Amino acid sequence: MPDFKRYMVTSALPYANGPVHIGHLAGVYIPSDIYVRYLRLTEKDVKWVCGSDEHGVPITLKAKKEGISPQEVVDRYHNIIKKSFKEFGISVDIYSRTSNKIHHETASEFFKKLYDEGKFIEQTTKQYFDTIENQFLADRYIKGTCPKCGNDDAYGDQCEKCGSTLSPEELINPKSTISGGTLELKDTKHWYLPLDKHEAFLKKWILEDHKEWKTNVYGQCKSWLDAGLQARAVSRDLDWGVPVPVENSEGKVLYVWFDAPIGYISATKEITADWETYWKNPETKLVHFIGKDNIVFHCIIFPAMLKAEGSYILPDNVPANAFLNLENDKISTSRNWAVWLHEYLEDFKDKQDVLRYVLTAIAPESKDSDFTWKDFQERNNSELVNIFGNFINRTLVLTKKYYNKVVPQIGILNAEDKTVLNEISKTKDTIGELIENYKFRESLKELMNLARTGNKYLADTEPWHLIKTNPERVKTVLNIALQITAGLSVLSEPFMPFTAEKIVNLLNIEKIKWEDADKNSLVPGHIINEPELLFDKIEDSEIEFQINKLLKTKEANKKDSIQLKPIKEIVSFDDFQKLDIRTATIKAAEKVAKTTKLLKLTLDTGIDIRTVVSGIAEFYKPEEIIGKQVQVLVNLAPRNLKGITSEGMILMAENPEGKLCFVSPEKEFENGSSVS
């Protein structure tokens, strides 16, 4: 690593309008935790802050929907997230919240300094106003028809159907999501950060000085900079958030994208009086862990804010990840298509490290990746149980069996022994270098490769056979296997902290420093504890339960998404009376040649025997419907269909998916009976 004296690490603040799911973990919080745990093991001076983002439109929308206050919403989800993070081993120095008094004060001071120094511009623009609710509306409070795809439920900032970014003014027939009423444009004043004035600095700082940033981060920043930056509003007409701290700003709060990143600073203030050393000293390395949807805020807008303020350092790196999908479908909180952390912790007690391992192994570091429950099970059973856990268990069991849990004396080393011991040292250095470069998937592979090396070493030396012919050699073999185990206890901690602690307890030793991972930490004569399995196999029934849970969610979403056809225009009773609908029985049925949808039906209407051609072949086989009673419109003018005269029309019910079913009497009824 470059010669930094200390590290300031931040993780994106999760919105307190819902729990945390596996997409958040894989994208932000597990990578952060790996990085910080490694820094601590190497005895670096590091502060890691996170907390709930408790302002903004999603919070107020949730509150209105549930009929409670925004504070009640954020209190509920802040506590859920904080508790689940702690149980999952997310080792932040503080999990704060932006509704805290210290945050309001810090954000207000930051804004006021820029305001007093003339770093903002004031603009009066026209924005939509809900005359029923008597308030200006944020983008997410406005819905209308998307001008790109025609979706009638597009929001004022985005159409979730086609993915287009929108502004409220682009919507066709915009309406308030609060009152449902139409809107009018009214003048409102706001403060803007002129990003265009910082464009030259940002281009040099990012495009020239930080070419080492991840390709997806660098590319997105370049795209924004190439398109030219525009002034960005830093205030909103809203009654929930940090009030704008200047005169004549009643009813206005700091825009959430402005106040949220300042939450990193206010959280640092809560854990150290020396907070400025971590935010204003150039010998501090600042790193932001985020998802790709936050790249612009952390690489362009927040740095522009810090630069405008003048006394803060800028981020050295912003290792943003892509998105994680779930069972080949985009994770969606609104559709409940997610694996929620707090629910996982209930369903898989004491299996925090299994999820940490799997999400690191499939982390979306350069492109979107996919989580499936079958892969989760396979990685646990094949890798954690059969490779990592198996090696450590065999080592401890053999030590107990042959030496009564006493670490044996190492003897003369051969070439194979020296190669294996050297592998511990190489692995330590490689994992460290990969973590420092934010390549967590690769670093995890190196950890597993060391466990594989241990397994191979035992398989090649076969101490269970060797004990009969060369017991002195077995002492050396098991001493080396125990050294690998001790090395794994520290090298695994950034990835699987609960497992690392278990290994330390099994070995009956103190926690090892990173630099000592390749040292012989187990002196001959040391007594280890009773062997225990590190991991258990996950059974098919456990996975089927999780898959069925998702299938139920999918079915519920399908029902919620069903849109029935609108009612047709009103007809008079006299018009209805003209329809002559009778009960009839299907006497014969056959497919119409050279068609896929048509059946030729012979009907007994009670009046006569007639032919009707019906487009139901996709849903019914001819032999299945003979004898079926149906309703038929008998006074419909005859039509020629594929050379067949059709004398009527069968009544069918059609669902929103286009499936058809007969409209039939509930019990056998006389043919010719009228529907009236």
Image (cartoon, rainbow, N blue to C red):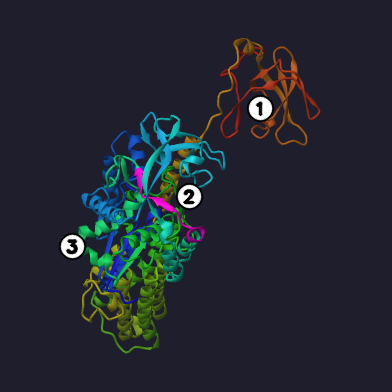
Which comes before the other along the chain, label 2 or label 1?
A: 2
Q: Picture coordinates of residue 186 (x, y %)? A: 41, 36
Magenta residues, as a range?
224-236
Question: Is 647 within the magenta?
Answer: no
Q: Picture coordinates of residue 5 (x, y %)? A: 27, 74
Q: Tell me if residue 168 can be seen.
A: yes
Disc 3 vs disc 2: which is toward the camera? 3
Q: Which residue is mark 1?
A: 625
Residue at 39 percent of width and 68 percent of height: 438
Category of crowding for the residue at label 1, using alpha-carbon neighbours closer than 10 angstroms: few (below 14), some (14–19), many (at least 20)? some
Identify the amino acid type marked 3: Ala
Question: Is 225 within the magenta?
Answer: yes
Q: Picture coordinates of residue 215 (x, y %)? A: 48, 66
Residue at 26 percent of width and 66 percent of height: 278
**Disc 1 to disc 3, how far (Cα)?**
82 Å
Q: Is residue 8 left or right of residue 600?
A: left
Q: Which residue is mark 2?
A: 330
Residue at 36 percent of width and 31 percent of height: 133
Q: Relative to 554, is 404 above or below?
A: below
In depth, the one of 554 and 47 nearer the eye is: 47
Q: Is residue 415 left or right of residue 404?
A: right
Q: Splitting the image into 4 quarters, where does residue 502 fall?
A: bottom left
Assign a secondary structure to mark 3.
Answer: loop
**Disc 3 to disc 2, how far (Cα)?**
42 Å
Assign a secondary structure to mark 1.
Answer: helix
Identify the amino acid type marked 1: Ile
Q: Relative to 461, is 599 above or below?
A: above
